[in-house]
Amino acid sequence: MHLVRIVSEDFGVVGGAALVYTYAAVFLVAFLDMPNIKQFSRKYLLIGGVLFVAYELCLSLSLGFANSREQSTQVLIVNYLWPAFTVLGAVISRHNSASLPLLISGCILAFIGVCLVVSDDLTSLLYGALSSVKSNPLSFALAFCGAIIWAIYCNITKSISGGKNAITLFFAFTALTLWGKWYLLDAGFLTNFTFASIFILVLAGGGMALGYGLWNKAIISGNMIVLAVISYFTPVFSGMFGTVILNIELTESFWVGVTSITIGSLLCWQSTRLFKPPVNSVQTVLDNTE
């Protein structure tokens, strides 16, 4: 994701994103072959495709529209609220039950973490967060909406996919949407194609193709709650890579916020593990067994 930010600096917000997703789609075709659209259900292609494209647009454009590299890192961490939203969505859809106090505590802690991430000063937490968001509400709104959309996508994909992985088509849909927007806006490109810019583009597109391809396979055949747990530490890795790839210095507030989001998300997961069904429910199960 940090490489996508660099690509947007080289080729423009829309043009850079379109190039990344186009290369990612070609990359997936090369490794997975051309998908046969007839093997996928219409429901999966329509609902899953719309959600995937909407999320990727929110994510890539939120990074591209960020005012600076530091802000793009903040925006990305806001997007990493999705693991907590995924657990919350699983509970709401009754795929899982949870301990309500722990779930609420985890969500509040994750929200406080976001405020810390987008604020540069621990002593003026709320004011600093609001000030940062006001400076670029579009980027932060896109990242937040993207987190919700991705949580919905992760929760429903397994049930509507029929065990099929349409990630290649979804990347192609996203690329076509971005090229359409690029054409309508007459956006053009900000720079000429150089070896360095193409190299970064290849790394960004290839990384996204591999990451999303494996993730989509995992949520189709795995346990979504367990997978969300594995992803809870993503903000930490994201911050570490951000300092290296984007060559930026992150504040103490940022790291405290990342820690808060991670702990909050873990509490959300723990709420699903410690939940104990009511006594009446247990008795009903025993009666049915007898």
Image (cartoon, rainbow, N blue to C red):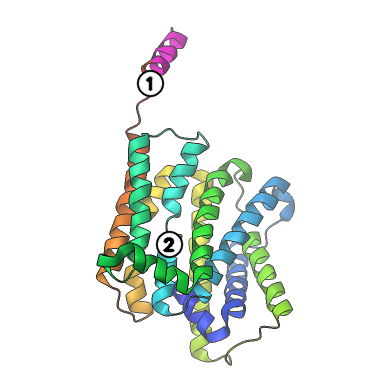
Residue located at (63% from left, 60% from top)? 170
Q: Is residue 219 magenta?
A: no
Q: Amino acid at mark 2?
A: Val
- The residue closer to the viewer here, 130 or 224, is 130
Q: State the image coordinates of residue 174 (x, y, percent, origin top left).
A: 64, 66
Left/right of residue 244 with respect to residue 290 in the rendered view: left
- The residue closer to the viewer here, 148 or 234, is 148
Q: Looking at the magenta stretch, what is its main secondary structure? A: helix
Q: Amino acid at mark 1?
A: Pro
Q: Quadrant of residue 105?
A: top left
Residue 283 visible to an observer of this rendering: yes
Q: Quadrant of residue 49?
A: bottom right
Q: State the image coordinates of residue 55 (x, y, percent, origin top left).
A: 57, 60
User: Does label 1 or label 2 sit earlier along the sequence?
Assistant: 2
**Local SS, label 2:** helix
Q: Quadrant of the C terminus?
A: top left
Image: 268 above or below 206: above
Residue located at (42% from left, 43% from top)? 225
Q: State the image coordinates of residue 102 (x, y, percent, origin top left).
A: 33, 39
Q: Which residues are magenta?
A: 280-290
- The residue closer to the viewer here, 177 or 215, is 177
- Report the disc number at residue 78: 2
Residue located at (59% from left, 44% from top)? 163
Which class describes the residues within 10 Å of circle 2: few (<14), some (14-19), or many (20+)? many
Left/right of residue 149 with respect to residue 38 in the rendered view: left
- Report the disc number at residue 278: 1
